[in-house]
Image (cartoon, coloured by chain):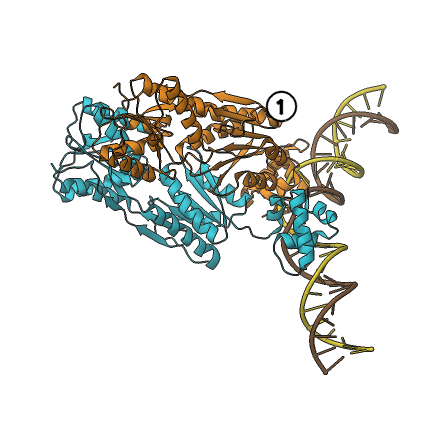
Chain colours: A orange, B cyan, C yellow, D brown
DNA sequence: TACTTATATGAAAACGTTTCCGAAACTTTG
DNA sequence: CAAAGTTTCGGAAACGTTTTCATATAAGTA
């Protein structure tokens, strides 16, 4: 079952078998065919570990993401894998569970599998450029807005959307339609999350529009789940919270919001408008269809992968790209 | 940065370093601490390839699934990973693209990574027990109804639901509520798919209830996607197809059906009932909530993983388990 | 004290590949 | 026909670990 068995079976050396296995030159046609036949017969598959061990560099890049595998992450991962595989790289995807240290996990992965590069997906990222430098491997961060405010570091790359701007635009879309009391739904605001940044944008939009901020309109579910959001929104309605629109920081949460409103006999959009962020396929299948600020998922993944490849292959310095969301109007928002 | 560097750095042999790295006995407390400190300092991570190469057996099992990463698959994979990791195994997940040979991919994976076992997830599986035997590795097939009708093979295991029975029960739920003209929605019926089996069950239910089968009520979208289903259902309505209920072979498709009906100004459930299969979390957030035959996702994954572990650790012969779906009533179906 | 037993450590083999280097066996050239 | 070049192949080192075995030291026993 090893390369030696193949070699013995057809009376050649292991070097020769290795050569034909890797399509190297310097082997005659006759021998090549003989070996190939033996490989088929013996049902031989090379041991990947041994292969990786000896070849100085691997052709693998890693993608690590935190939390559950949301459709949004999957979209990005799919786009990245496509680019990587076209460039002849294999991809290893690692899901780091909540509570684990994702950079540490990534470091372990990179070291133990000798990765050529690492991409990180996730909402929150608390490391400094120095931390990333310690990884000593090309690094790109996607779907993340730098929370330590040093986007200029060229030791790593980032491809992101501007979450503050997204929050601003979301609020503006609703304000433009006459809404003044706009609830904001998220898991938590106090954990340096994306939600916090989008809330910042929301507040700026209110300020620019001369609308007073009402902190009571911030609905925190406590955790990032549809169930928690549904409960929180239902409670808000029960408590008599007065609002004409809801801005949910993601489509998944927006869908839960719509359900909660429906449960409370509030019609969307007649009684309350709902706006999400992400642009999931599922959003357009809601009744009414969910209005959303679509993230450029494909573009995030593709650009992220290309930037990483550029660092790997050409040793380019890190670059920082900010992409834009696009408004996808649906039936879930109305003028007031 | 290798184990040798660590050894040299603290003046001990590689064997000693290896021992502390693997929590082996026979090393004094002082040396252990010294090595541990050096490992931290040098930021050393063992080379996984070398490790895998030398240790006779790995502790990894593989999960291969076909198609996109649906929430349903993710649920099963999550449940499996939990069981495997509790048993001290690591999991490698492989997604085989449409058109690839999944058994071949699995074989390659198993061989090259020296997997201890293999789990397959997916709707259709065209291999014979003999094919599986050739893999020469413990094998379990989940979410799959054996299409070659030889469930008794003990060279591999399966944990599945009875798709024919599921189709039967789905139809019965609707028939019980007075429906006689029930449309069936799926991608294709003619590819030995799960859909075909559920359609068989549907026909049996009609027969048992003395309702004539109308082949026109079978709506094939051509491909498994929400977009295709929406188009197909809208076309069916436009063509004047007469039905009072729809049985969609999955929740995702059912959601697309609901959207299509809404686009055609048909109310759910007043004008048309809709029933899905899977029991996705998302289903309960639809408005109205989608009635569904929930698959025992957790159970499928857990049972599948346990059966595989049993084969790996105890050399048990294959076993074949058939689990049941449970009806989750929602607002999408009504009496007629 | 002298002998056995426990404990801690190092040297070296092994895992299955790839690749460098050199040696045949041919082929071309002058 | 000899020298030089080509092609094809095998030997052996190397990759970074784990593990077995032997050995040196420490501890226990009579």
Name the one closer to the observer, B23 or B232: B23
Question: Toward which corner of the image does residue B146 lie, by quadrant?
Answer: top left
Q: In the shown orientation, is residue A88 left or right of residue A249?
A: right
- Placement of the C terminus of chain B among the 4 image quadrants: top left
Q: In the shown orientation, is residue B304 left or right of residue A21?
A: left
Percent across and percent down for residue A270 are 22, 24
Residue drawn at x 26%, y 29% as measured from the top left = A242
Name the one closer to the observer, B139 or A15: B139
Q: Chain of mark 1?
A: A
Q: In the shown orientation, is residue B77 left or right of residue A112?
A: left
Percent across and percent down for residue A148 are 54, 30
Residue drawn at x 26%, y 20% as measured from the top left = A334
Residue drawn at x 69%, y 54% as measured from the top left = B15
- Placement of the N terminus of chain B among the 4 image quadrants: top right
Does residue B104 sit above or below B323 in this rendering?
above
Q: In the shown orientation, is residue B15 left or right of residue B160?
A: right
Does residue B231 sit above or below B335 in this rendering?
above
Percent across and percent down for residue B5 are 72, 45
Residue B129 appearing in the image: yes
Percent across and percent down for residue B197 are 27, 41
Residue B222 appearing in the image: no
Q: Provide the residue designation for mark 1.
A: A316
Residue drawn at x 54%, y 47% as measured from the top left = B114
């Amino acid at each position: 079952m090893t390369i030696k068995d193949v070699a013995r079976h057809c009376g050649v050396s292991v070097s020769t078998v290795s050569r034909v296995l890797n399509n190297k030159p310097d082997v005659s046609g006759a021998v090549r065919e003989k070996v190939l036949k033996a490989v088929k017969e013996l049902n031989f598959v090379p041991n990947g570990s041994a292969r990786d061990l000896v070849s100085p560099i691997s052709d693998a890049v890693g993608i690590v993401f935190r939390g559950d595998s949301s459709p949004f992450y999957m979209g990005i991962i799919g786009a990245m894998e496509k680019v990587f595989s076209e460039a002849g790289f294999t991809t290893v995807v690692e899901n780091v569970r909540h509570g684990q240290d994702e950079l540490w996990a990534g470091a372990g992965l990179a070291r133990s599998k000798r990765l050529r590069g690492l991409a990180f997906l996730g909402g929150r990222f608390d490391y400094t450029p120095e931390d990333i430098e310690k990884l000593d491997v090309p690094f790109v961060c996607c779907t993340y807005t730098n929370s330590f405010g040093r986007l200029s570091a060229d030791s790593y790359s980032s491809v992101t959307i501007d979450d503050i701007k997204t929050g601003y635009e979301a609020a503006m879309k609703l304000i433009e339609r006459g809404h003044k009391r706009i609830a904001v739904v998220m898991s938590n605001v106090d954990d340096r999350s994306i939600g916090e940044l989008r809330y910042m944008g929301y507040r700026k939009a209110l300020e620019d529009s001369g609308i007073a901020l009402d902190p009571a309109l911030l609905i925190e579910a406590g955790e990032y789940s549809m169930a928690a959001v549904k409960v929180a929104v239902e409670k808000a309605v029960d408590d008599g919270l007065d609002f004409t629109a809801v801005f949910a920081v993601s489509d998944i949460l927006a869908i839960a919001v719509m359900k909660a409103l429906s449960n409370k006999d509030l019609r969307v959009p007649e009684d309350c408008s709902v706006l999400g962020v992400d642009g999931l396929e599922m959003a357009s299948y809601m009744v009414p269809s969910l209005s959303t600020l679509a993230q450029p998922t494909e573009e995030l993944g593709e650009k992220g992968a290309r930037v990483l490849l550029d660092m790997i292959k050409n040793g380019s310095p890190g670059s920082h790209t900010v992409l834009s969301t696009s408004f996808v109007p649906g039936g879930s928002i109305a003028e007031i």
